[in-house]
Amino acid sequence: MTDRNLLFACLAVLTLGLGAPVAAQSSEPRPGSPPGTCIVTRVDGPAIVSARGAGARPAEIGLGLGRNAKLRTRAGARVTLACAGGLEVVVGPDSEVDVVGLLDGGSRPLGLRLIDGIAGFLFASEDDHGVQVRTPSAVAAVRSTQWAMQVDRRASAIFTREGTVFVVTRSGDTRLGPGEGVDVARSGRLRPVTRWGQPRIDRLGALLGPDW
């Protein structure tokens, strides 16, 4: 998928409504299931995985998050996920993430929702399939890059460490390059793109820990 197509896909998701509810399914991986799941590879501190019909259980290494499963981390906790398409997701403390599943008719990219808190995203190679991440105020689409997203009281902040990130809101869209970040108000209003200073980058890194 090209970067331009990723942006158009984001706009389509935005049209359907930011933060639209999705039905939950079992978090247990099933043999022969499509590569739309994430697997827990590291757990530091208390975190819960839940899915409708399957209840809730503590996050543990090897646990799979199927389509529309939810992960919640508590204060001081971090969880690392290995997801479809060579994507690694580091979920920081006091965070809530939904695995939406594969988009574009079940092909690619992977869709996630960051309801609250912070998450960092890393791809293993330039051939990976990409990811779209929705928050209550923005949609971000990327392919083969390293970046992070934070949500606080429905406002969003997006930072790109490497590569390019497209950000789409109800008020417009923008593109972030390496070292750049943008804040999005809870209304969806985009603030100007800026180069983040090292203190803010360090605060982001401290929340996400060594995996990011």
Image (tube, rainbow, N blue to C red):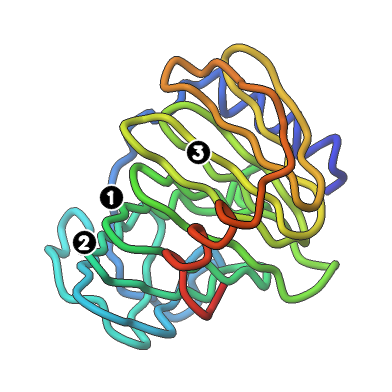
Looking at the picture, which amino acid does disc 1 mark? Ala
Give the mark nearest the N terminus, 1 or 2. 1
Decide which of 143, 116 is in the foreground and name it.
Answer: 116
For disc 3, the marked residue is: 134
Decide which of 145, 93 is in the foreground and name it.
Answer: 93
Give percent across and percent down for residue 164: 80, 48
Q: CA distance from mark 1 to mark 2?
A: 8 Å
For disc 2, the marked residue is: 50
Query: Is residue 97 rendered to the left or right of residue 128?
Result: left
Looking at the picture, which amino acid does disc 3 mark? Arg
Give the mark nearest the N terminus, 3 or 1. 1
- In the displayed structure, 75 sits above or below 189; it is below
Looking at the picture, which amino acid does disc 2 mark? Ser
For disc 1, the marked residue is: 24
The image quadrant where one finds the C terminus is bottom right
| The quadrant where residue 169 appears | top right
Q: At numbered mark 1, what does the secondary structure look like: helix, strand or loop? A: loop
Does the CB distance between marks 1 and 2 fall below 8 Å? yes
Give percent across and percent down for residue 155: 42, 30
Q: Residue at x 65, y 27 (%)?
A: 168
| The quadrant where residue 57 appears | bottom left
Q: At numbered mark 3, what does the secondary structure look like: helix, strand or loop? A: strand
Q: Residues within 10 Å of mark 1 (few under 14, many from 20)?
A: some
Does the CB distance between marks 3 and 1 fall below 8 Å? no
Q: Residue at x 71, y 22 (%)?
A: 173
Decide which of 203, 23 is in the foreground and name it.
Answer: 203
Q: CA distance from mark 3 to mark 1?
A: 16 Å
**Can the viewer see residue 11 in this picture?**
yes
Badge nearest the viewer, 1 or 2: 2
Q: At numbered mark 2, what does the secondary structure look like: helix, strand or loop? A: strand
